[in-house]
Image: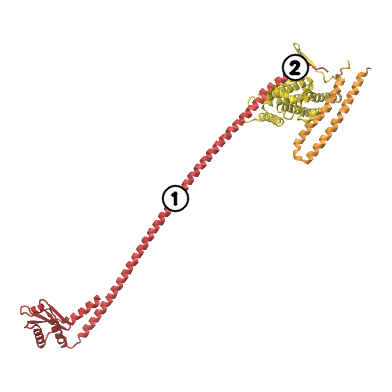
Chain colours: A orange, B red, C yellow
Amino acid sequence: MDILPAISIIAAALAVGFGAIGPALAEGRAVAAAMDAIARQPESAGTLSRTLFVGLAMIETMAIYCLVIALLVLFANPFVK
Amino acid sequence: MHIDWWTLGLQALNVGVLLWIFSRFLFRPVADIVRKRQEAADAVLAQAEASRTAALAHEAEVQVNADRLSAERGRVMADAEAQARATAEAILSDANRDAARIRADAEVATVALKEAEMTRLATQASRLSLEITRKLLARLPYELLVSGFIDGLSEAVAHLPEETRAGMGNPDQPLILTAARPLTDAERQTCQDVLERILGRSVTLTTETDPSLLAGLELEAPHALVRNSFRADLERIEARLIHHD
Amino acid sequence: MISSPLSTDVLFHIGPIPVSDPVVVTWGIMAVMTLGLWLATRRLTIKAGPVQAVLEMIVEVIDGQIRESMQVDPAPYRTLIGTLFLFIFIANWSSLIPGVEPPTAHIETDAALAALVGGATLYFGIRVRGLGGYLKTFAEPSWVMIPLNIIEQITRTFSLIVRLFGNVMSGVFVIGIVLSLAGLLVPIPLMALDLLTGAVQAYIFAILATVFLGSAVSGEEGGKPEPQPPQKED
């Protein structure tokens, strides 16, 4: 049993797991702020929710990057022959 | 991981073709039609603006016409009013003049009537008085009807002009002595005597009778007439009374 | 072991050229778009019908977004931005058709799109400001920033590629995993989320392209600070 695949799997799991923490916190704060703003100004709920979705997608991109890294490690690892 | 360069190239080509497709079949036609619609809307707006301008011009024209008509109507009305006022004034002045004339006429007529009435009353009163006089005279004594007047006759003859007296009493031109009643011989003689005394010569005397003399004697010569009777007196009085002068 | 989502399958060859799966799907999208748009815009009238009204609304929304982001007349950029948005949107939603994998789930397509954005940025920047003017924007606010600006140009293009690729590919990948685990109806919410993600990513890609173009043609903001703050986090 080669050690490299095992390390790759662990690295992928760590990348996705830790990489999800930051975006999760950020998304929570973003949604909380958006809810606060909507509660203050219900008339601008449309603009706020649209901006919120775009922002969430932006934040989510962080987690997606981690996922890409994990997939690269898993499927396209240059060190695993 | 490896990148398929052929796929990358083909996809780049595809994206370029997609650009053309979207441009050719979506964006350009839609932009064109939007522009056309905009132009149409602009045209319609311009037309509406032109129509509005025309309508405004028309309205102004109508307003001008209305003003003109109004002014004309005002002028006509003023004219008519002035004319009516003039006519009314003319009629009024005519009426006033007529009324004044009528009133003046009426006053004149009234005055005339009054005068006529007064004249008539005066005349009537005069006649009445004369009639009374005649009636009263008729009751005088018979002799007095002649004798009382002989003196008057002689006086009147004496006052005649000389040439008149000269022609009186010629035999060819007898004097006519008119009395109210037939003269008696004595009376006739008296008269002849008196006349001869006054005239200074003999006179031929014919006598006549005229009851209308009432009383008195009248001597008639070819060129003279001596009226010495109540009738003559009364006539004189009457003339003076009635004619008021 | 499921197959790698990063690989591309070559379906057939035209001469020496290998034609892969995303290329074929893109061709299909192109054909459908050409036919549909030709039919839809064949008879445009001033009095818009329903289809024409929808098309005009799409174009006007794109125009409005460009005008809002760039503060310029949207006409020169309408085709580029509109094509990016509509193609990515349709490509992302093409996963609704069974057996079709979105071409944007392969990094070559995203790379081609990002290369188009980079080339358009260069083209419009030079066209509007001149070659010297455009190169001078790299030295803002001072010449010290030149390497950083160049790196930023490259990294933001890469971030465009990886963001779109990662989002779409992860959606496809997750759906594939769930489908292999759980059968019939379970992937449907994930597919719905995937559609939402696809639409949002198409919008983000187009908006970021607009922002890049705007900073290139009207870059009075000082060059260094990105107009879109989230961009710096990539």
Question: Position of B152 compared to C28: left or right?
Answer: left
Give the answer, above or below, for where B86 lies relative to A11.
below
Q: Which numbered tag is attached to residue A62?
A: none
Q: Quadrant of residue B24?
A: top right
Q: Are marks 2 and 1 on the same chain?
A: yes
The quarter of the rendered structure image containing the C terminus of chain B is: bottom left
If you read the primary sequence from the N terminus, does the residue marked by circle 2 or circle 1 appear first?
2
Q: Which residue appears farthest toward the front when viewing the image? A: C143
Q: Which residue appears farthest toward the left when viewing the image? A: B172
Q: Quadrant of residue C176?
A: top right
Task: Say which residue label 1 marks.
Answer: B75
Question: Position of C144 compared to B28: left or right?
Answer: right
Give the answer, above or below, for where C213 lies relative to B192.
above
Separation (CA) of disc 2 from disc 1: 94 Å
Mark 1 surroundings: few (<14), some (14-19) or many (≥20) residues within 10 A: few
Camera-side residue of C17 and B42:
B42
Give the answer, above or below, for where B109 lies relative to A52.
below
Camera-side residue of C82 and B179:
C82
Question: Position of A33 compared to B190: left or right?
Answer: right
The quarter of the rendered structure image containing the N terminus of chain B is: top right
- Which residue is drawn at the image coordinates 37% and 61% (left, top)? B93
- Which residue is drawn at the image coordinates 39% and 60% (left, top)? B92
Amino acid type, mark 1:
Arg
The x and y percentages for residue A72 are: 85, 21
Amino acid type, mark 2:
Gly
Q: Secondary structure at mark 2?
A: helix
Task: Say which residue label 2 marks.
Answer: B9
